[in-house]
């Protein structure tokens, strides 16, 4: 009888301490995930995340979400003294680089640090992993989309969780993480169990005592560190687990490459509309004189309007709720699009009344000045959009600034020329 009770106790103990870890690797960068049984059943609770990569990377990030915009991203980089790691939870901001999230419930666990040229983060994420500002993730589901990225180069060596990071290199993408292999157990740290991260019978692992790891308590402000020096941490830097084994290889930047192309399309379409077609349509009505010029002007502006709306739709795809209040490029873009809606209406009313009275009316000046404001704001907003990309390069900024300035000056000169040639009350249809 006692033997049966002991056997049941041992089985329960084994069930409570064993925690499966699902691993995904991209070259020499590896990620691990464990979803405890309670979290998998209820959808609420902790999850455990593992990130490891050589110190030849400036930073490595793992994010919850299908694209950078609105994702919660865990960014790992070396600490100030170069002997430890900093974990920085950040929110993907669409056009902008991810920003540090204050109050995120994340705890660095035993085994985090730098060993033999390998950065490692073992972390427990609390309620913020289910829902955060910009998104959510359902852990009762069978899978979800995650993103990853990295930047090779000199180590950041910073304890600052808001440290400025450079844009990722060519190693980035998204993948579907099968949660079924990660669910189960109730371990306080599934990554310190050798069997949970083992890569198979053919692999070898070097285990180093946790007491040998130098820790910096301030790496994550307000977080506790779990101790337990008697438990060994299995370092994967010298084993096949760093690149494969039972870890599934991920790769391909298809999702983010698609996002990058969409951003380029947004910028090109908006630029073509705001810097080329809108100004050309406005200039033509002032400098040219041929039959049906008014309808040429109208057709040019409607065509530009259509292009701008297409650019707006693509841009809105990358918007997060936070952007609505603080992204000046987005705010100006929406204001311009709203006013553009009324511009052809005002133009039509102006045309009708001009033919009736043979002079400009209130509607004429409303159409005229609204057009001037729209063209000016559109050109300025194009430059602001380039600044948000963070990596367009000085040559692109200079080229856009030069071309846009010349076109705006030509537009202003055409308006002044019209004013000088005709009495205010007898001007033709114009902007």
Image: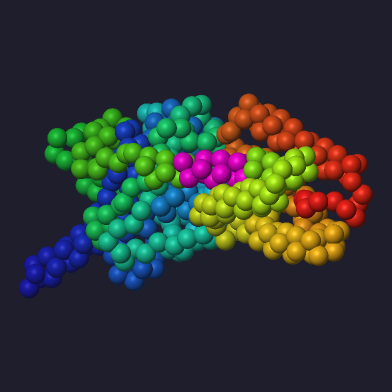
Viewer can see residue 27:
yes
387 relative to 89, above or below: above
Horizontal relation, residue 49 to residue 331: left or right: left
Q: Position of residue 378 (x, y in %)?
A: 69, 47
Quarter holding residue 347 = bottom right
376 relative to 367, above or below: above
Residue pictured at 51% horizontal, 26% vertical: 154
The residue stretch that appears in magenta? 261-273
Viewer can see residue 384:
no
Q: Position of residue 329 (x, y in %)?
A: 66, 49
The quarter of the picture where the N terminus appears is bottom left
Residue pictured at 89% horizontal, 42% vertical: 421
Q: Position of residue 133 (x, y in %)?
A: 53, 61
Horizontal relation, residue 247 to residue 420: left or right: left
Residue pictured at 92% horizontal, 49% vertical: 423
Q: Position of residue 385 (x, y in %)?
A: 63, 43
The single residue placed furthest to the front in the displayed view is 291
Front-lying residue, 25 or 392: 392
Front-lying residue, 269 or 120: 269
Front-lying residue, 318 or 341: 341
* Main SS of residues in magenta: helix
Whether the magenta-drawn stretch holds residue 264 is answered as yes
Whether the magenta-drawn stretch holds residue 246 is answered as no
103 relative to 210, above or below: below
């Amino acid at each position: 009888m006692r033997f049966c009770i002991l056997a049941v106790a041992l089985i329960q103990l084994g069930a409570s301490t064993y925690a499966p870890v699902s691993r995904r690797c991209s070259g020499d960068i590896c990620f691990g995930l464990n979803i405890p049984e309670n979290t998998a059943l209820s959808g609420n609770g902790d999850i455990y995340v593992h990130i490891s990569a050589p110190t030849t990377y400036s930073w490595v990030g793992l994010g919850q979400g299908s694209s950078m915009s609105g994702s919660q991203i865990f960014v790992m980089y070396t600490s100030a003294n170069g002997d430890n790691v900093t974990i920085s939870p950040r929110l993907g901001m669409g056009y902008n680089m991810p920003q540090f999230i204050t109050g995120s419930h994340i705890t660095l666990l035993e085994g985090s640090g730098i060993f033999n040229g390998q950065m490692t983060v073992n972390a427990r994420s609390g309620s913020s992993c289910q829902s955060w500002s910009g998104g959510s993730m359902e852990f009762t589901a069978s899978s979800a989309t995650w993103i990853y990225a990295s930047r090779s180069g000199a180590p950041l060596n910073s304890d600052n969780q808001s440290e400025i990071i450079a844009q990722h290199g060519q190693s980035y993408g998204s993948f579907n993480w099968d949660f079924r292999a990660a669910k189960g157990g109730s371990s306080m740290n599934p990554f310190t169990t050798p069997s949970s991260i083992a890569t198979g019978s053919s692999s070898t692992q070097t285990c180093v005592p946790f007491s040998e790891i130098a820790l910096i308590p301030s790496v994550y402000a307000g977080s506790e560190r779990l101790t337990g020096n008697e438990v060994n941490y299995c370092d994967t830097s010298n084993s096949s687990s760093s690149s494969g084994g039972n870890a599934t290889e991920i790769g391909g930047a298809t999702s983010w490459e698609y996002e990058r192309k969409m951003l380029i399309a947004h910028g090109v379409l908006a630029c073509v509309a705001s810097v080329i077609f809108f100004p050309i349509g406005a200039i033509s009505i002032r400098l040219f004189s041929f039959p049906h010029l008014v309808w040429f002007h109208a057709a040019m502006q409607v065509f530009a309007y259509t292009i701008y709306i297409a650019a707006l739709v693509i841009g809105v795809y990358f918007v997060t709720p936070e952007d609505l209040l603080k992204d000046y490029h987005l705010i100006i873009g929406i204001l311009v699009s709203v006013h553009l809606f009324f511009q052809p209406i005002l133009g039509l009313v102006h045309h009708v009344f001009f033919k009736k009275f043979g002079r400009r009316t209130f509607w004429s000046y409303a159409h005229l000045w609204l057009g001037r404001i729209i063209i000016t704001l559109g050109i300025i907003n194009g430059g602001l959009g380039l600044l948000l990309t963070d990596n367009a390069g000085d040559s692109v900024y200079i080229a856009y600034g030069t071309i846009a300035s010349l076109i705006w000056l030509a537009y202003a000169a055409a308006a002044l020329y019209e004013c000088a040639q005709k009495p205010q009350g007898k001007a033709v249809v114009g902007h």
